Every structure is written in structure tokens, then in C-alpha cells.
Amino acid sequence: MPLNPARRKFFSYLAASPFALHAQEFFPQKPQEAVNVFDLESAARKKLPPAHFGYLTTGVEDDATLRANRDAFSRYQLRPRRLIDVSKVSTEVELFGTRFTSPVLLSPTGSNKAFHEDGELAVARAAASRNTGQILSTSTTVSLEQVNEAYGAPVWYQLYATSSWAITEKLVKRAEAAGCKILVLTVDVPAGRKTETEVRFKRLDTRTCGACHGEGPIGMAAYFRRKPMFDGIDTAGISLFAPALTWESVRRLKQFTSMKLVLKGIVTREDAQLAREHGVDGIIVSNHGGRAEESGRASLECLPEVVAGAGLGMTILMDGGIRRGGDAFKAIALGARAVCIGRPYLWGLGAFGQPGVETAIDLIRTELDLVMKQCGTRTLGEIKPSHVQRSIL
Ligand SMILES: Cc1cc2nc3c(=O)[nH]c(=O)nc-3n(C[C@H](O)[C@H](O)[C@H](O)COP(=O)(O)O)c2cc1C
């Protein structure tokens, strides 16, 4: 039915209004057109096969923890200080003896070739070009050695311990031989998870998964076959997850390797205290981007108690829901020395490859630089708890 002129006028007014512009989804054709990282998400969703975008975007069960990660940032407000000379601001951070241009590192994420043919190589080149830290997943689809070469230095290595200690040792030895200095042990997925959004996206995909993943259900055997970290390792009957992992395993690992040990996935004061007692060097406060258990609790909300439990001297990072420089600022104000992003750089990768990852890094770092100026903080060290307040609403 044709619109009557009055309604047509109303809708064209609405479409041109700033409100509609704000609400419209924008699909950048080039990385430079992305105004924020959400634009990269739109572009990635358009480009990627539904099954792969589902793997990228999913949380677990109702995705409540995934949403909580984001929502938490809006509960903290900024308390900008005035009349401070901010003509020079530095976002640099030193972590375990290395200086990075930005305190926003790249979280470990698996199977990057599902998002772009260059996979982890594109990520490494982007991270290197921006002097940004990269944590490489055990589930990498490019070998660790090739990634280190592309990065120009050893990356941080993220370990999934697997259900076999013998394999754990092989992975750690390989990371050491490749020159890695930081070992990030992920402790938040002991025995699988229920990724319902991923399942639903897969059903939208008309392609045959078996063409790439091999026939039959995509199980552990198919998984190991496509992951270079397991080349030459007998993985029969082995699971990537390590249900028997305990604090005793952390002690063993600490004795086994000379690398700095960082635990990823600690979310309570009690476990932060135990980490300290076990000589752990750092913690990444994380719920795996809402992809582990459906706790409903945001990473940001967990951060203060982990900082308190870990005490002075431990390096605390945080990830989960960071999309803006302002989010990084709030996490640093609450005690994180640095933060990490997962999905935002994968959106960039899926949308545009290496330049997309660079854009994600640039957008968040530039926003952080601006927020620091707006709040009167010239270095990360000047960002204090008094620069944020928790909303009373
Ligand atoms: C597609 C994808 C794959 C991931 N793979 C891993 C992994 O292999 N190892 C790991 O420790 N964490 C993994 N994570 C979790 C991230 O390291 C990180 O904790 C999370 O993405 C941070 O939240 P954000 O995506 O909201 O930034 C993955 C996350 C995503 C989105």
C-alpha cells in the first residue's frame, strides 16, 4: 500500500535525523570508514560464513555473561579532573620487561583462519606494526614459529593444558624453544561448554562443513588434525580441555618452565590469593568473553576483588567486553595494568584482514588517548580509582 504524503514526509524526516543515523547499522567498505569497532563487527558479519561468525560471536547458554561483560562498563562513570596540562599523553605500558605502545593487548583466540585466509599471520603483522602485545592460542591455525617470525619477536603463548600432562610438557617445551617468555595458562574451561548461539548460526549455513573440516561430526580428532601445535603429537583419546587440572598442576608447571606464568580466567579473590601463594606472575581476569560458564558476572565486576586478593606486585590484566578506549580506562582505574580484546580484532580480521586488525587496535588506542586527556591523566600510572565511580542507580 503506498504511503500517504504525510507519512512519507515523516519517514524521510526520521531517516535524515541524527537519531536515525545513530540507530542505523553501518557497513564500512574499507577499514578507514569504520568509526568504531562496532562498524567492523557489521562488516565481518556480512562477510563471514554464518557458522564462522557464530563461532566468533557466541557466548554460552543465554549469552547472559557475554552481555554482562558489556553492561558493566556503563555502570562505571568517569570523574574527569580539570586544569591539568594534557598536551602530552602516553598510552605506553611495560609488561614483564617489554614496552608496548598501548595497554590493549590481543587476547588469544583460536582458529583465526576461520575469519581470514591469513589467520594468525595477519594478526601478528598487525600487532607488530602497532607495537601491540599478542597472545597466541594453543588453537592457532598457523604455527607458533611462523607467527613469531611475522611478529618479529616471541609472542605470549596461551596454553590449553589438554587432558594429558605429557602433551602439556611438549607444548610448553615447544613454546620455550620458540623463545616465548610468557606462558598464559587458561583455567576457565575445565570440561567443555554449551555454545547455543554458535549452534543456531551453524544451522543458517548452507555450506558443507565436511569439505574443510573432514567428514563426520566436528570432534576432537578433526580439531587436532587442523592445529599445528599438535603436529607430530599422538592425540588419540585426548581432550583439549583438562578436567583434572589443579593448583598442584600450577605448581608443577611453575617448576617445569622458566617462562613467566600468567593464569587466564581467575575471577575471585580466593583464587587470586592462591595464585599468589603458588608464585604465579600474573593474572588475566577473564570469563573467556562469556564463553566459559554462564556465571552472569562481568569481568569488570570481578576485577577489584582479584586485584585485592593478588596483592601488590602481581601483574593484573583483564579482558571481556572492552570495545572502547573508555572501557580500557575504567579497567585500568579499577586496578588492571593492561587489558585485552578478543572479538574486536577478530571483527577487523574477518572484515579486512591485517588492515582491519590494525584499525581495531588504532580505534581503541586513539579513544583511550582522548579519554586520558579528557580526564587529566597523562600516563597510565596517573589513572586512579578516583577517576571512576560506580553508578548508584
Ligand atoms: C572466537 C574466539 C576464540 C577464542 N579462543 C580462545 C582460546 O583459544 N584460548 C583462550 O584462552 N581464550 C579464547 N577466547 C577468549 C579470549 O581470549 C578472550 O578472553 C575474550 O575474547 C575476551 O572478550 P571479548 O571478546 O569480549 O573481548 C576466544 C574468544 C573468541 C571470541
Image: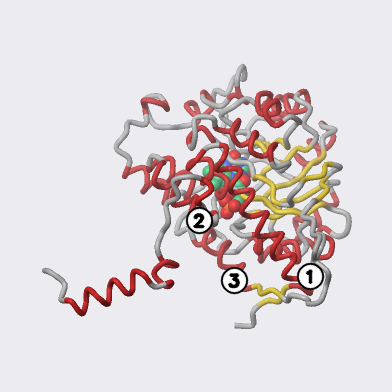
Position of residue 28 in the picture relative to residue 156 (left or right): left
The alpha-carbon separation of the residues under discs 1 and 3 comes to 20 Å
The quarter of the rendered structure image containing the C terminus is bottom right
The alpha-carbon separation of the residues under discs 1 and 2 comes to 27 Å
Q: Earlier in the sequence, mark 1 or mark 2?
A: 2
Q: Looking at the picture, which amino acid does disc 2 mark?
A: Phe
The residue identified by callout 1 is 376
Q: In x, y percent, where is residue 326?
A: 66, 64
Position of residue 180 in the picture relative to residue 68 (left or right): right
**Viewer-proximal residue, 67 or 166?**
67
The quarter of the rendered structure image containing the N terminus is bottom left
Position of residue 219 in the picture relative to residue 309 (left or right): left
Q: Residues within 10 Å of mark 1 (few under 14, many from 20)?
A: many
Under circle 1, the secondary element is loop
Q: Name the outermost residue toward the top.
A: 232
Dot in front, 3 or 2: 2
Q: In x, y percent, where is residue 333?
A: 76, 66
The label shown at residue 74 is 3
